[in-house]
Each structure stands twice: as C-alpha cells, then as structure tokens.
Image (tube, rainbow, N blue to C red):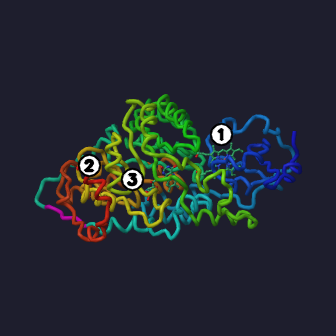
C-alpha cells in the first residue's frame, strides 16, 4: 500500500512517481527511456496520470515496458489532491452545442464543430501542425489550385466507385489514414474507426501508436465481419529506436491478420508541433517543453528510430514475407519515389504527415505532379496513395485523375469519433460517397479507371514545381 501523500512527495525528475489506475509506479529511471519524452511524464510527477496515460497507451504497455520492481502497489487516500492541473473534459454527445450528426454536411463543418466542442487536449493534439503551419495550410489550398475540365452529354446514371486499395476491394478509393491517440477524443478510440470503416467497406490503416491494442482492434474487426461488415485492417509501422523490435511488431501484424504493411518513413524525428507543445507547457508552468539538446544518449525528438535507411527495408520485408503489400508512407520527392520502386515495394504513399513533420515540405499533390513530370514510369509500376488536406470528394477525384490509386483521410476520422463515435465515422464515408459520385457524374465518367489527366487543369501548380532535382541519379537509371 502507498498513500497519496507519499506519491505527491515524489514529484521531481530525481524521484518521480505516478499513479495509473490506483496503482503507483516509480518511473524515475524510465524518464530518459520513455518514447514519449521526459516531459510528458514529468508533467504528472507525483500525480494521478491515468487519464492522459490511457489516452496514449494501449493496455499492457506498463507490463511490457516497466520492470515489475517499479510497481509500488495500490494507492490509498485522497485522490482529489493528486489530480493534474488540466483535466480533459469531453463534451457528451448530447451537448446542445453539437448539432445532430445528420446535420453535418461536409468535413470542414465537422472540423468547426470539433473545434468548438472537443476537449482542449484532443483539439490541440489532433489539429496541431509543425512550425509556421505553412505545409499544413498548403495541403488544403493546393487542392483548390487544380480545376476540372468536365465533359457533357454522357449517360452517367450509374457510377461505380469501387477500387482495389492495398489489395482490398474497397467501396471507395479512400481509406482511414493512421492516426495515434484516438482515445483522446472518445473512450472507444480506434474501435470507432474499426467499426465505422468496416461497416462502410473502406480500409483502415491503424497507427503503430494506437491507443487501443492491435489485438483488441483485430477482435473488434472479426466481430464486425461476423455481422456482415467488410473492410480491411492495415498496419502502419514506426520502426522503434531499438530497430530489432520492428521484427516483433511485423510478426504481430502477421499473426493478427493485418493485410498490408505501411512503413512510415517521414519521422526520423518528430516535428516541432507548437500548439500541442504549448498546451503541455500550460499544464505546469515550471516545465520547458523543448527537448533536452544536451543529452547525447538520445536524439532530441527521436521517438522512433532516426537511423532507418533503404537497407532496413530488406529485412523488414523479409519478416513480412508475402503476407500482403508493403507501402512506404511519407515519400515527398520524385527521387525517393524512384528509389522506392527500385527497393521493390508494392506502393508509395505520398504524405507530409498532415503538415506535422517538416514545415515547407510539399503537399502530396505537388509530389504527385513532380513524379508525373520527372519520372512518370513510377505511376505505371507502383500503386500510389496519398493524403494531406483532402476534405472533399472533388479532392479524391482530382488525385485519381493524376494517377493516385486512393486517398487517405487523417483528421476527419478523429474529429468524427470525437463528437459522434462510430456513427460519425460512418457519416464521413457517406458524405464522401455522395461527393465522389456527384463529382464523377458532373465530370462525365462512370468508372474510376476512366479518370485521367485530361479531366483536370494543373497549370497553376505546374508553375510552382521545382526544376531542380537530382538529375544524375535519375538519368543513371533511365
Ligand atoms: C508509467 C509507465 C509508462 C510506460 C511504460 C510508457 C511507455 C510508452 C511507450 C512504449 C510509448 C510509445 C508508444 C508508441 O509509439 O507506440 C509511449 C508514448 C507516450 N507516452 Fe508513455 N509510458 C508511461 C507513462 C506515461 C505517462 C505517465 C505519460 C503522461 C501522462 C505518458 C505520455 C506519453 C506520450 C504523450 C507518448 C506519445 C509520444 C508520441 O507518440 O508522440 N507516458 N509511452
Ligand atoms: C492526430 C494525428 C496523429 C497521427 N498519427 C500518425 C501515426 O501514428 N502514424 C502515421 O504514419 N501518421 C500519423 N499521422 C499522419 C496521418 O497518417 C496523415 O498522414 C495525415 O493526418 C493526413 O492529413 P489530414 O489529417 O489532413 O488528412 C497522424 C496525423 C494526425 C492528425
């Protein structure tokens, strides 16, 4: 037994105890090893960290990562004194300020409602992006720079939106992009996306850092299938600092029946996301949320490995074997698209992580155009996925006209589950179904394979594309 007074007296980096679900843990030695950084734990030193902890970690994380000897026992006493200064408040779904789900007409409206009604924590983490937020903003605005060239006098009564997405026969050319910490928005977290996407027959690429364990997601998916749902689960992999641990993750993905492996390659370090960092700083004014730049043992912001290179893909792919497609997420240049093709992956996923990593990186739309301009063969030989700032069916159709296979949606699904749970996720897919079908009809096409670059005008963006690429590298391979 440990008393609440005892716990509260261990509130510094020299001696740091936290409570999670009535249990006390000594995490002093673990601070520097913590993949979420020192400060995220230190903000809760001597306090009850349950709420924040559970939003971030799947069940069993403590058992897996913390030696038993640091478990101090059950806590007794007055818990009120141990509450952290900022508790998230999730507005109940019946909140009068939140309109009925059926009134949500588009994904921008969903975002506006989420901003007004979500907890500060959830909004900060979901909406934040890197540095000046330029990339985040361009992700959205670049889609508006492409216009359509519609054809008329064609029979468009029946349209077919089905598409093969990483091996799965999806109802639409879309999928839910990997996004961590869904439990911040809703206690059911990722399960809302598992249910909503499988009921709508679109795939869900789960995050390596999901707040629900993958086995629980896989069980939920199986239950959905028994009830007649379709869909598919893919596994997004972050290679851990100890690279060899990626083998265990890949084995788990295989054992649990995940159908595709999506390796994120844009996160050598975590981007500087200031809105989220500011909120964390406000939790405890004493804390400086900038990483410790003088600690030689760790790469600052290096939550995942910072040493991943093209050679690592070989052993990761061997471990995955022929289980399903392997796709690289985070390709941002024509050169890397070409290297990915040579590395033998099945697909590339153009993404700047929703503007959360390198500020001033190109939108995925620009990367797609760059590939078209300098190395279009990639588009014939690889499946090309993309995400970032897509909020409309028109965005999806534009991407497909330019050679993409399917488009990922990140924040919209998080916003949907925050206010509306599974029903919100289903609503997002319904809205996109309507918008994609309507766009196809008004454009004069009935099947996705009829889409081609003649249906869009890209002049505005073409003017913004680079002329300087690594020509020697490309030429040597032509
Ligand atoms: C007590 C034992 C703890 C253990 C064993 C632990 C373990 C971990 C692990 C393994 C991850 C990486 C998850 C992944 O990327 O898959 C992680 C991330 C994280 N942890 Fe903890 N953690 C602990 C306590 C805490 C506490 C008390 C907090 C704050 C209340 C916290 C906040 C975070 C955050 C914010 C991340 C996410 C970093 C990111 O993805 O950007 N952790 N933790
Ligand atoms: C809150 C949040 C968490 C994310 N977590 C991950 C992650 O765990 N792994 C990953 O590869 N990408 C992650 N991403 C990036 C998304 O997969 C995707 O690239 C991005 O959200 C697309 O942009 P959009 O939000 O404008 O649709 C995350 C994005 C957000 C907004």
> Does the Cβ of the disc 3 residue fall within 8 Å of ligand 2?
no
Disc 3 or disc 1, which is closer to the eye? 3
> Main structural element of the magenta stretch: helix, strand or loop?
loop
Q: Name the residue under label 3.
A: 331
Q: Which stretch did the figure color magenta?
A: 147-151
Compute the Cα span from label 3 to label 2.
19 Å
Give how far across and how far down residue 241 sits, in percent. Answer: 58, 44
Q: Position of residue 335 (x, y in %)?
A: 33, 54
- Mark 2 and mark 1 lie on one chain; the one further toward the N terminus is 1
Mark 3 and mark 2 lie on one chain; the one further toward the N terminus is 3
Pinpoint residue 203: horizontal percent, then vertical percent. 40, 42
The quarter of the picture where residue 277 lies is bottom right
Give residue 40's position: percent from left, percent from top: 68, 55
| Tally of marks | 3
Give the SS element for disc 1.
Answer: helix
Q: Nearer the viewer, residue 274 or 416?
A: 274
Residue ID at (25%, 54%):
475
Instruction: Tell me if mark 3 has few (under 14), some (14-19) or many (20+) residues whose alpha carbon lies within 10 angstroms of its own.
Output: many
**Mark seen at residue 61:** 1
Disc 2 is placed on an element classified as loop
Q: Does the residue labelled 1 lie within 8 Å of ligand 1?
A: yes
């Amino acid at each position: 037994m440990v008393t609440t007074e005892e716990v509260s007296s261990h509130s510094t980096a020299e001696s740091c105890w936290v409570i999670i679900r009535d249990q006390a843990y000594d995490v002093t030695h673990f601070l520097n090893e913590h993949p979420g950084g020192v400060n995220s734990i230190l903000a809760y030193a001597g306090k009850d960290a349950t709420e924040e902890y559970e939003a971030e970690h799947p069940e069993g994380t403590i058992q897996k990562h913390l030696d038993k000897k640091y478990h101090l026992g059950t806590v007794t006493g007055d818990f009120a004194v141990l509450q952290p200064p900022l508790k998230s408040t999730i507005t109940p779904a019946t909140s009068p300020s939140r309109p009925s789900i059926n009134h949500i007409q588009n994904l921008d409206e969903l975002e506006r409602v989420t901003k007004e009604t979500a907890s500060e924590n959830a909004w900060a983490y979901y909406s934040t992006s890197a540095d000046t937020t330029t990339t985040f903003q361009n992700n959205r605005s670049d889609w508006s720079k492409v216009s359509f060239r519609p054809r008329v006098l064609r029979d468009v009564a029946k349209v077919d939106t089905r598409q093969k997405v990483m091996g799965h026969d999806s109802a639409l050319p879309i999928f839910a992009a990997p996004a961590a910490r869904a439990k911040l928005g809703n206690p059911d977290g990722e399960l809302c996306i598992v249910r909503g996407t499988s009921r709508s027959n679109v795939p869900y690429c789960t995050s390596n850092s999901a707040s629900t364990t993958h086995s629980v997601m896989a069980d939920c998916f199986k239950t959905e299938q028994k009830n007649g749902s379709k869909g598919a689960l893919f596994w997004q992999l972050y290679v851990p600092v100890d690279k060899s641990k990626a083998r265990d993750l890949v084995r788990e993905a295989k054992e649990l029946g995940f159908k595709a492996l999506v390796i994120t390659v844009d996160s050598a370090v975590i981007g500087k996301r200031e809105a989220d960092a500011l909120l964390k700083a406000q939790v405890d004014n004493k804390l400086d949320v900038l990483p410790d730049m003088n600690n030689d043992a760790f790469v600052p912001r290096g939550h995942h490995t910072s040493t991943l290179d093209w050679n690592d893909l070989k052993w990761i792919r061997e471990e995955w074997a022929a289980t399903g497609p392997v796709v690289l997420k985070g390709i941002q240049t024509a050169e890397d698209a070409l290297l990915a093709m040579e590395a033998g992956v099945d697909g590339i996923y153009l993404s700047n992580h929703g503007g959360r990593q390198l500020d001033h990186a190109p939108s995925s739309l620009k990367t797609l155009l760059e590939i078209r301009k300098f190395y279009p063969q990639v588009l014939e030989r690889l499946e090309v996925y993309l995400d970032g700032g897509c909020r409309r069916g028109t965005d999806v159709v534009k991407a497909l006209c330019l050679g993409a296979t399917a488009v990922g949606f990140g924040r919209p699904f998080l916003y949907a589950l925050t206010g509306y749970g599974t029903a919100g996720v289903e609503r997002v897919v319904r809205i996109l179904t309507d918008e994609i079908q309507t766009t196809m009809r008004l454009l004069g096409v009935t099947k996705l394979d009829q889409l081609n670059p003649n249906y869009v005008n890209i002049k505005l963006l073409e003017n913004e594309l680079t002329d300087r690429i690594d020509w020697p590298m490309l030429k040597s391979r032509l």
